[in-house]
Image (cartoon, grey):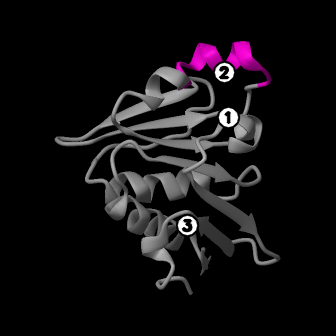
Amino acid sequence: MAIFKTQCPAETEKIGEMLGKNIKDGSVVAMFGDLGAGKTAFTRGFTKGMGILCDVSSPTFALVNEYRGEKRTLYHFDMYRISGWDDLYSTGYFDYLDAGGCLIIEWSENIEAILPDDCIRVTITKTENPDERNIEIIGAEFLENTGG
C-alpha cells in the first residue's frame, strides 16, 4: 500500500501520472471517493503517464470514454449511475475487460462485487483543507516505497 497527500489538483494528477507510467496493459484501476474528490484529475494524470495525450473528462453521461494513444488504450468508466446487472451489462464492461487496454473506473463502490481480484484500488479522500487530498493505492507494489 502507498499513501500520498496532495495539496492541489496538479499534485493529484502527478500521482495518477506516476501510476500510469508503470501500469501494465490489461490492468484494472478501481477508484473510490466522494463527488469532487479528484478522481477525474487523477485520471488526467494517469492518461498522461500512459503516454496518451488527449482531453480527459468524466464519462458521467457517456458511461465510458475511450482514449487511444499510439501504442496504448485506456477505457475510462463512470459507474455512478449503475444500480444493477442490466445497467452494468449495458456499459460493455465485461467486453472491455478482455479488450487488451487498461480500465480506470470511477465510482467503483457501485460494482465492487465484480471487480477483478487483482485490480489496483485507489481511494481518494478529502480533508478539512478544501484543496488537500489523501490518496491510498493498494495493489501497485511498484509505488509502495514512493508514498509520502
- Spot the residue most to the left: 70
Quarter holding the N terminus? bottom right
Between discs 2 and 1, the one toward the N terminus: 2
Quarter holding the C terminus? bottom right
> Magenta segment: does it hold 28?
no
Picture disc at residue 114:
1
Q: Amino acid at mark 3?
A: Pro
Instruction: Residue under label 3, please give it.
Output: 9
What crowding class fits label 3: few (fewer than 14 Cα within 10 Å), some (14-19), or many (20 or more)? Answer: some
Query: Are dots 2 and 1 in contact, CB under 8 Å?
Result: yes
- For this view, does 72 lie left or right of residue 12? left
Look at the magenta stretch and give its main secondary structure: helix
Q: Amino acid at mark 1?
A: Ile
Identify the residue at image location x=38%, y=42%.
Answer: 26
Residue in the foreground of this view, choosing between 41 and 113: 113
Q: Amino acid at mark 2?
A: Leu
Between discs 2 and 3, the one toward the N terminus: 3
Q: Cα distance, mark 2 to mark 1?
A: 10 Å
Up the image or down, 110 lies above or below 99; here it is: below
